Structure formats: C-alpha cells, structure tokens
Amino acid sequence: MVAEARRLGWSVASPSFSLSARDPHAPGQAWPRCKRWDGLCDSPRRGSVAPPPVFGSPWNQGLGWGASREVGSALSPNLQSARPGGACQRAGMGSSVSGSSSSLGETCQNGALLDVGLEDGGSLTKLAYYSTVQHKVAKVRSFDHSGKDTEQDHEPPYEISVQEEVTARLHFVKFENTYIEACLDFIKDHLVNTETKVIQATGGGAYKFKDLIEEKLQLKVDKEDVMTCLIKGCNFVLKNIPHEAFVYQKDSDPEFRFQTNHPNIFPYLLVNIGSGVSIVKVETEDRFEWIGGSSIGGGTFWGLGALLTKTKKFDELLQLASRGQHTNVDMLVQDIYGGAHETLGLSGNLIASSFGKSATADQEFSKEDMAKSLLHMISNDIGQLACLYARLHCLDRVYFGGFFIRGHPVTMRTITYSINFFSKGEVQALFLRHEGYLGAIGAFLKGAEQDNPNQYSWGENYAGSSGLMSSSPELCPTQRARSGTFDLLEMDRLERPLVNLPLLLDPSSYVPDTVDLTDDALARKYWLTCFEEALDGVVKRAVASQPGSVDAAERAEKFRQKYWNKLQTLRHQPFAYGTLTVRSLLDTREHCLNEFNFPDPYSKVKQKDNGVALKCFQRVVSALDALDWEERQLALVKGLLAGNVFDWGAKAVSDVLESDPQFGFEEAKKKLQDNSGVDVILGVFPFVRELLSRGTEVILACNSGPALNDVTYSESLIVAERIAAMDPVIHSALREERLLLVQTGSSSPCLDLSRLDKGLAVLVRERGADLVVIEGMGRAVHTNYHAALCCESLKLAVIKNSWLAERLGGQLFSVIFKYEVPAE
Amino acid sequence: MKLKDAFFPWFGLDIGGTLVKLVYFEPKDITAEEEEEEVESLKSIRKYLTSNVAYGSTGIRDVHLELKDLTLCGRKGNLHFIRFPTHDMPAFIQMGRDKNFSSLHTVFCATGGGAYKFEQDFLTIGDLQLCKLDELDCLIKGILYIDSVGFNGRSQCYYFENPADCEKCQKLPFDLKNPYPLLLVNIGSGVSILAVYSKDNYKRVTGTSLGGGTFFGLCCLLTGCTTFEEALEMASRGDSTKVDKLVRDIYGGDYERFGLPGWAVASSFGNMMSKEKREAVSKEDLARATLITITNNIGSIARMCALNENINQVVFVGNFLRINTIAMRLLAYALDYWSKGQLKALFSEHEVSGVISCDMLTFIKGMLFTLC
C-alpha cells in the first residue's frame, strides 16, 4: 500500500558521514566531492543555495524515467510459507478485552485519577488511569554461531522468538457524571495495587462526590488544585502530542489548522473559560502566574442564557445561538450612525452596544437572537481582555480552554474572531485537541511525580483514541449516539526521551510531512481510497504472519473493522487526529495492527530475505570493488534504490507480486542492470562500506520498533554482526566505532525528525555529523522531502505509487535523488 | 464662525445611541434692543424650554444640572440640559418643523452618531442644516471646559475615599491641575476609552459593547422595567450574590493559590446555571447583578488599558453613571483594589440636592465648543 516500507529497509534516519578533520583522506576525496556528484545530480557547489528538487535526474545517464519500472518478474518468497510464529495475544493484566473499542479492559495501576467536573465541564467526569499492556512481540536473537551457519542454505540468519513485552499506557476516559457510580465500580474492580490509599481528584466535582468516592473505593480522596493540574496537563499535551494545538479558521475547509509542535512552548498565555475566566501566564514547566480573569465567562453565558431563553442546557443554548441573528438585539454602529459609517470609515456591523436594542418594553425578542447576542457579547469581551493581557505581557500565543470552548465550533469561531479583531491579527488564538483532558492529565502527572518525566516520551495511540469532534452533536449526531458516553484518549509511553535532530535548520518551522491531506482534498481522497483498497492485503498478510494462531483470522478481521472505521471517520472528519497525512494514516494502521496483536507481521519475511541477502553480500561487494570509482558510486546508489523498489508495502509492487509470484529481486536487479540487492544488506551496507573505506564515520539509525517490513534496530545489530563476520571493513569499523548502529526512536514507516531518540541526537552532535542520508518513500518523500537541514543531505527514494509519481511529474518507479547543500 | 456672532438661540445636540442630550444657552443679558429684534418664534422657544421641566412624554430638563450665570463667549446666561430618548428623534425634528426653527437662521451644532444618522432628516423635514462635530473632540473639549469653569463655583472632579464602606465612603474633590495623561472612559450605550495626552493629542484606545445600553437592555429583558431610573432603583434594592457565583462559593473561601479573595465574583450569573437558584432570585437581584457585571467589566478593561498605556488617572464619564452611585463606587473600589492603589478612578460629577450626577460632561460635549 503506501509506499513506505522497504523490506529490510534500512530505516535510516540519519546515517551521517562526518567529514572534515576526521577524514583521514585528502579533502578532495571526502564526501561532498561535489565535482563527482555535480555531474550526477546537477547540484550546486557547496555554499550555494540548494537546488530545486531533482526528480529523477540523477538517472539521466542510463536510468531515465521509469527505467526501474520493468522491475517485475520472478520472485519466489511465498508469503504463505512464513513459518509458524507465536500467537500474539494481548493480555491486559486484569481482564483481556481483545479488540473492544473501549480500553476498559486494561488495569488501573497505582494512581488512578478522577477529574470530576461539575459546574465546570458541563458535568463530565474524566478518569485517568495508567495501565500496563502486555504484548507478545517478535524479538530477534542471534544464533550462537561460529560463522559456519552462512554455509547452510536453510538456516535462517537469526532466531525470532516471541516474548512478552510490557508497555505503559495512559488512558483517559470521560463520561457524564450520571455514570459516576459505574465509573467508580470500574476503578474498584481494576485497581490492582492494593497499596493504593489515595485517589487524586480535581475539578468541582471532587468536592461534591468526595464522600461517594471515598465510600465506594475505600480510598482517601486527594484533591488537587484545578489550575495547577490544568497547566501541567497543558504543558504535557503541547510537548507530547503532535498537532495538539490548532487555529480555527472560519469558512475554510477544514476549519482546523493544526500547529506543528514548537520546540519551546514557553511562555504562553492560557485562558481557561469555565464558569468564569482565568488568564494564566505560563513561563516554565513549574512556574505560572494567574495574571487576571473575568467573571464574564461560560457561567454567564449559561446562567444568563437560561434566564433569557428558558433553555436549560449549555449545548442547547449554543445551538440556539448558532441559529440566531444578533443584529436584532444588539445596537450596531450603523444603528447609531445610519448610513454615514461608510464615509467615516467605520465598520457598520460592529456592535456598539450589546443588547442595546432590547432596551424597550414593547418588543419581543427571539430566543435564538438573544442567545446569539449573548454569545457575541461574552466571546468579544473575553477576546478583548485576553488581548489586553497578551499585550501587557508581550505574548502572542493564547491557548483557550474550558468548557465554554470544548469542542464547540461556535465558540471557537467567535473567540477567534474577537482575538483577531482586538489584536489586529497580532495575537493568535489557539485551541487544543485534548483540552477536555488537561485537568485529568495534570492531576495524574502530579500523582506520579516521583517518576522522572524526562525519562519518557509519550505518543498518542491512534487506535485507542477517539478523534477531535467525534462526539460533537453539531457535526455528527449519530456518532455521538453510537459512541455513547465514552470519549477516549490513549497515550503510549516510550521509555526513552525523544528530541529534535540537532541538524534541523530551524526546529520551530520544521514540518515533517510533505503533503497536508486535511488541506489537499484531492490527495486526501486518493490516499484514503488507496489505504482502503490495500486493507484486504494487509489483513491477509497479518493472518499469514501467524499461522500457528487459532484466532489470527478473527483478530485480523477485528483489525480490518477498526482500521476501516478509522478511515471512514477520517473521510468525514479529516482533522480528527490533527493534520491528516500519509504518515498518520500509516501510523494509525500500525497502531491498529498492534492493538490486535500483530506487532510485526513481517518478521518472518524479513528473516528469510535477510538470510538470502546475506548469502549474496560478498559477491555483491566484490563486484562493486572491481568497478572504478565513478562506476562504483553509481552502482552503489542504484543498489540503494533497487532495494528500495523491492518493497512489500507499496501497493504497486504488491500487485505485481501477487499477479506474478515468480517476480523476485533477481529480476529487480536485472531490470536495474546492476548488482544491487535487497535494501539493507545489499543496498545500504555496501554504501556504508564505501564510506567507511574512505575514512568516513557512519551512524546507521534504524527504527526502534517494527513498522511494515522496515528493518528494526535489533535486526540491524544482527545483520551487522553477520556482515562483520564476512567483511573486514565492516568488522573493523564496528570494532573501532567508526560505524555506529543506533535506534531512531520511531516505530513508523515515516520519520519525524523532531521526535528522535535522544541517544541518536547526542551522537550526531558529538560526532559532528555533517551529512544526512535519508532513504525511502516514507522517510524521504512522504516526510522530510522539504526538511531543511544545516548540513548537506541526500534524500533518495523510488516512487512506487503511480498517482504520486504522476503528481510529481514522473512515472511509476521514477527516482528521487535530492542532494541539498544548505545556504550559507 | 464664532458662537458670539451666531444668532440666538444657542443649541448643542449630542445624539447618542440611546439618549439625545440637548444643551441650551439661555442669555440673561439680552438688551432691550435685542429683544425687540427677536422674532416671535424665538421667544416662544425660549419660553417653552425654560419654563418647562418635561417635554412631551419623554423629554426631561435636568434642572439640577443647570449652570447659572455662566459667561460664554462674552454673553452671560444659564446653561440648560435636556434629554430624551434617541427613538424620539423623529418627533423632535417634527417639533422643530412645527416651531419653525429654520426661520431663526441659527446653527444646530450636533455630535454623536445620530448627527450623521439624522442629518438628512433635519434637512428635509426640519429644513435645518446641522453642523456636525467630531464626538471625541467634543468630549475632550467639554471636559476641559467644564473643569475650567467649575460647577457653580465648586470643583468638578471627585474621587471616592473608602468606596467599599457604606459608612466611611465619601466623595472628595480632586484638583485636576495636572490632567495629562489621563484615561477617559466614556460610558454611554457602549464604552469608548481614550488616552488623552494634551488638549489636542488624544487617541481612542479601545471600546467595548458592554455599556449602559447593555445594562439597561438586559434589565428590560430580565425584569420588565421600562426606564433606566427604574432599573437602577431595582438594582439598589437587589442582592447580586444570589445571582453571581463568588470565589468563596467555589473554594469555600479565598483562593489563595491565586490570591483571589472569597468575595470576588468568579462567574457573573454563575448561580443561574442552577434551576433551583433561578427560581429563588428576585428581579431586584437580577438588576443588581447586571449592574455589577457591566460595571466590573468596564473597570477591568479600563484598568488593563491604563496599564498598557501607562496612565494612572482614569476619568469615568457618561450617562451610565448618571444617578448611579453603585457603579461609581464599584469602579472606584475595583480600580483601587486590583491595581493595589496604583490607579485612581475620578468622576466628573456634582451634587445637587442629594442626587449625584456626572453626566453633565456628556451634555456639554454637545455644546459645540469647537467654536469657542
């Protein structure tokens, strides 16, 4: 399906080649031997502005457009022959709920937390709890071999064993207060840690339900400060959830424009519109200051609205407002000035006096009109105050939260309008996807303060989270009915911190994704359909990957249903999980596969292919060594790309394979007229070897976790070990630490350079990396195609999707070879 | 044209969104010669205006505001203040036609949005040419003028001492001898906020649509009252804490984490989210809460503007404050409290027979003093 994934792919985030002083060879020989490469890729000299993307041009001399497209005939790997693997059953510690859409089958660990909203929050209770999720995962382990194994044809290069892995997951569930007893029962049933004596609770309901909670759970309620929790939660989501913040744009499609995570989120202004309004300036992780507030807030809208319209519910008031016409109630500038406002340069539609027209006894006003007028009055007032505070404190980003805002396009629209009006565009009104969870998240983190949060990273689990607006009555009433009272967010914990690639030119403007599918309706339609069509194949392969499992077919079917539903949600609400991208579609699929215990459907395929490729390695390397320098460079790059063509993930290739099971990489090699092999072993390693033999140090970074058929870090370690046993260059480089194998921190077919494993970032900085090579469609085309680095970079991929190829002006199997030199 | 060259009568009109303020200068030094020259219509107008305190069903002359023995452009006389609702403007124009104002060859100086809105009606129906004056110019000039002449020999500018304390609260004169810079908050139907740096140097800082019109409009909807006076009277008898949710209602006392006192309003009308509480409040409570809500908000915005503009004296004027001691004291208190004493709320008011009023400035601004 989508193009990402090379089987065996080297998940190269940033193999970097350090040059300069560290290169023992003559400088003229070192990497940016631009003379050589100029000829190939038409790139400018060092120091000049990077050229426009070179699409396919490096192949002008022999491999023109589509040259590699004849790839196609005989390959044997029979998918069905994958060896029986361990059945991967997810086992939540308490009860196992395989595949239920709610994650309530997990287990509460110490530190369940209640955010019982009451007067705030429109009576929603948010429950946060921490669970450990046990997955069976495929682990690779090197055989205890003496180097003879390679001689034995049927011996796989390494062993795959199924192991239990425990990952931490944070769950956030919200439901209406009427279900609080059911909620408490759930906590009671699942709270395994009997040491727990305290439950943290925040929100107004923490007071009201204190006795009930203490009695039911036999736990002491620890009330946490609402605002402290809110801000802790806000910092957490801004840092950990990509596309958390968005601006609301009226009349654009979609109305939400998501922000990429800024490396430095401080300082910012948080305006929480609950019953009243609190304006808080957040300066650091732990320092914030209440700088002001207003009593005119959500409670005013609700309370005054109820008095004026006899409508009791907040949501209904908003609905009334969205149908009303405020000009019947408000006195506008044009009501005072007549038609003269135009000549005076005044906007006639400005409200001069809210409710100014209602100062009369002899007129009836409609509920809708009054509600609308009230909404404008309150939104404008809050916006004005927010701007005044922002100006006083020199801040230009204002995040809005609170139940007045929560998922209501109507209020987001009026607040945004007001901020734009009063700040003349200088202040940006921002909203948060998980705004409703901030208090719960913050209080939870507060309860877990003994943990050092800097050791971890968190990622939104798309499989277990319901999307933005998915329960909004305005947008999707049926869905609300279906989803009942639940609204979910799940965050998976990665036991490693993720940071920016230090070589990003401007981390604050870095956007990983090349195409914004929320924006580009045509591309969105194409990709959604593409993923839908590929689903059958994915299901088939998932089942095939676990032949020994009795319930594999059943789980695969559940996976199909879940992912299909996600795709349908995204069709109607592309903004549901932030900016929709090919990456997020791929990641969602990975998360859904994991959810149903298909953590690494390709492990066996990779094992087999790696075994085959290892056998060819020495032959490939000697053939390369026989070439002269220039020919060899071309052959090496072709090798990199050839491996990339051969990719189970890309639908086009997959189609060829399915219709012609004889198609194989021998054919791929033939079509590319050279000795290239399967991606990492026959493509990447020879390339790396060449660099090493020139004296360049190389960091080879691979995915931390499995994604499609990309090589994982642990697989790369074994592959390297096996190659080292055959090849003295690789052997000595590993021993002398001139070749370093690290993990990227990613488990995606794509790559977000702003969320890389800290170890990689440290190494890149320490070794002074000055060239980044990124390979493959997922990492170099779907993401990072436009990534600007402060060192030289090479992005290469074969376009394995005809629609994309056409869009880029090429043909299927055309080549991207993008060599960039940063402007000085 | 200079005012003194103009024929009598001297009028000034400020046509706002809700109220029309009419200022009339009644010359007391008319010579016999002049009197003889006076056309009959002028005499009848003078008599009509000065011998009545009410005109039609809605026009009112604020006798208590009258400025006596004023010297204006070399003439001595009394300045009268008359107000009527803007929606009666057509009737006023009709009256001008009936009383044949156009025969007076006088100039009608007018300001406020209505000067534009009704210009054409004045011309076509009343055969009167309006001399339109910039509203903000008029406002500033009016203030400076009134401050220079004083009010019937007393000081114009006042502030409140101990505004929160019913017993100790007192109004004290404030000598505005260093008027600049000052923040001028004009509360009419809506609110305009101006930063004044000198007589000729000022700017409009911002404004809000939550003003006197909002208070009155909401009161009409919530209580069924029909006049501003009635709304204020109800407010004076109500208890807003039944309607508003206070900090102490949420936190049981002060919210120390943020230094918020328990008595502060956390959510205006916040208690009205509850059905039981909605049923338990009186119209008076609602009127009071509306007044407190609007006034607090104006105070809050004014304070932020003062901080942003780095100005520490704030003068509140406008019709909203007419006979509105509650609002003035609240503004005084709120400004003092939240600024920790850094900001001073000033009111340009005077006291006549126990009734506090400060609307004279809005009246006077209609008085065309650009001509002086």
Image (tube, rainbow, N blue to C red):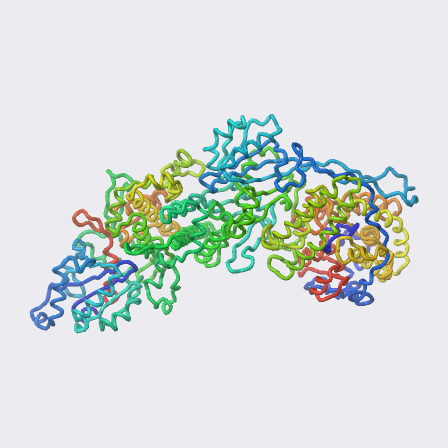
Q: Quadrant of residue A70?
A: bottom right
Please provide percent x and percent y for residue A186: 58, 33
Counting every numbered tag in the picture gives 0
Q: Is residue A508 above or below residue A163?
A: below
> Farthest residue in the left direction?
B32
- Which residue is at a point 9% across and 69% down the rendered structure image? B35
Q: Quadrant of residue A670?
A: bottom right
Q: Is residue B309 above or below residue A240?
A: below
**Quadrant assignment for the C terminus of chain B:** bottom left
Camera-side residue: A551 or B263?
Answer: A551
Left-right relation of A496 to B212: right
Left-right relation of B354 to A746: left
Please provide percent x and percent y for residue A512: 65, 54
**Quadrant assignment for the N terminus of chain B:** bottom left
Camera-side residue: B264 or A807?
Answer: A807
Please provide percent x and percent y for residue A439: 52, 40
Camera-side residue: A266 or B354?
Answer: B354
Left-right relation of B144 to A631: left
Residue A696 in view? yes
Camera-side residue: A320 or A345?
Answer: A320
Please provide percent x and percent y for residue A607: 82, 45
Left-right relation of A442 to B13: right
Residue A699 in view? no
